[in-house]
Amino acid sequence: MPETDPRPGATAVPEAAVPGTGAPLQTGALLQTGPLLETGPLLETGALLETRELTKHFRIGGLRGHSLHAVDELSLSIGEREIVALVGESGSGKSTVARLLAMVYRPTSGEIVFRGRPLGDLRSRRDVLAYRSQVPMVFQDPFSSLNPSHTIGHVMARGLKLHRSELGRKERDAEAERVLESVGLVPARQVLRKYPYEMSGGQRQRIGFAQALSYRPKLILADEPVSMLDVSIRVGLLNVMARLRDEQGVSLLYITHDIASARYVSDRVLVMYGGHLVEQGPSEEVLHDPVHPYTKLLLSAVPDPRARIAISSADIGEPPRVVDPGEGCRFRWRCPVAQEVCSRVTPVLVECAPGRGAACHVAAPAGSGSIRRAGRAEAAPLGPVAGA
Ligand SMILES: Nc1ncnc2c1ncn2[C@@H]1O[C@H](COP(=O)(O)OP(=O)(O)OP(=O)(O)O)[C@@H](O)[C@H]1O
Ligand code: SF4
Ligand SMILES: [Mg+2]
């Protein structure tokens, strides 16, 4: 599986050139993609995309160095027309999950299945690019993906030529206007003539969603898409995300530090800690009645869960240890209810209520409802919650 630029249509970009890893994006050679994967079935669970024990370790400190466990055995699912929020403090592995799903990183182990097809089976560049047009990524900093010397019209037309090559010029123009309008950028015709520097941060972020939308995606990976925006603009963009789900049937993985915005817009919330998925369930339930001690700690830091909560390790003690972590719960050093078993055995995600899961020896003891491998045995991620 090649490790490439996650923008649909771009190829051959090394890991170091991906946003968030410190270096600017490069423009790779661009290829046309076809409508591959579009007819694939949904998974038996009804999920659009699933990960099964997805793991990403980074070697650090040279050959004799150490192993940084950014993501460990993470099993999640995202349904059709579903917004799933992925929350957790800095370094918990959220962006690594997004890059794995965008095929920027190769998993160390585990697999990702999209519409019934393991991504490991996508061998050709054409298949990978077709996947990326259905699962595009929107970044925190839209400037990194917008060339300042090109108008928005040029940017939109280029993407449409690559991914919707069946469209003629007039149809491309009409499609560009349609997607700009659907993300609230009006009058679209004027927007098409503008340069990125003529637009506000919120408008540029909407361009990112419009670009992704023009490829007719099934699932948009949005990594902190609103964290650089003012609160008033942020709400507008969250509403855009909800409209994409409701009116266009697009699913979203919404990565955020801000639990309140997750509550506002998402159907389900997944909480990560130290590379592990520690709790998941319908957003209202998880945020009103958290099960895992980490989720409780996060929410207790702010008395009103409706307030904007930015997750920061400074508020809640030491960050997790993810370098050569060994067995045991990664939250044990901060956990107020830790027991002896917590330092010996890594807790697995178990179903603690219908549609809800938590990984904690005390709050959700392993039993018949195990949904992640108990002792690394029977994996089965929770499906999307009906009616959520
Ligand atoms: N390319 C890489 N090489 C080595 N370590 C990495 C790499 N990418 C991420 N990591 C490490 O993996 C861990 C998870 O990082 P990640 O960026 O996924 O966290 P995050 O939850 O997105 O954090 P933030 O909220 O700050 O964006 C961190 O310890 C990070 O330093
Ligand atoms: S497994 Fe143990 S240390 Fe981890 S959250 Fe539960 S009680 Fe705390
Ligand atoms: Mg991140």
Image (cartoon, rainbow, N blue to C red):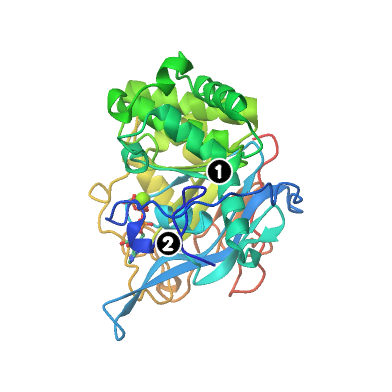
Q: Amino acid at mark 2?
A: Gly
> What label sits on residue 145 in the rendered view?
none
Q: In this picture, is 109 found above or below 4?
A: below
Residue 366 visible in the snapshot: no
**Camera-side residue of 231 and 200:** 200
Asked where in the image residue 113 lies, by quadrant, the reply is bottom right
Distance from mark 2 CB to nearest ligand 1 atom below 8 Å: yes
Q: In the image, what residue occupies the spot 58% across and 38% down?
A: 215
Q: Nearer the viewer, mark 2 or mark 1?
A: 1
Question: Residue extending furthest bottom?
Answer: 64
Sequence-first disc among 2 and 1: 1
* Along the viewing direction, whichever of 231 and 260 lies nearer the viewer: 231
Vertical order, 301 against 100 (above or below): above
State the image coordinates of residue 9 (x, y, percent, origin top left): 51, 49
**Label 1: which secondary element:** helix
The amino acid type, in three-letter code, at marker 1 is Leu
Say which quarter of the image contains residue 62: bottom left
Along the line of sight, which residue is nearer the eye, 203 or 363?
A: 203
Q: What residue sits 33% from the left and 40% below the top?
A: 141
Within-10-Å neighbours for mark 2: few <14, some 14–19, many 20+: many
Q: Is mark 1 within 8 Å of ligand 3?
A: no
Secondary structure, mark 2, is: loop
Furthest-front residue in view? Answer: 169
Q: Quadrant of the N terminus?
A: bottom right
Which residue occupies 57% across, 60% down?
A: 125
Residue position marked by numbered label 1 in the rendering: 162
- The structure residue drawn at horizontal position 41% and vertical position 20%, both measured from the top left corner, is 191
Q: Is 235 placed left or right of 220 in the picture?
A: left
Q: Which residue is mark 2?
A: 275
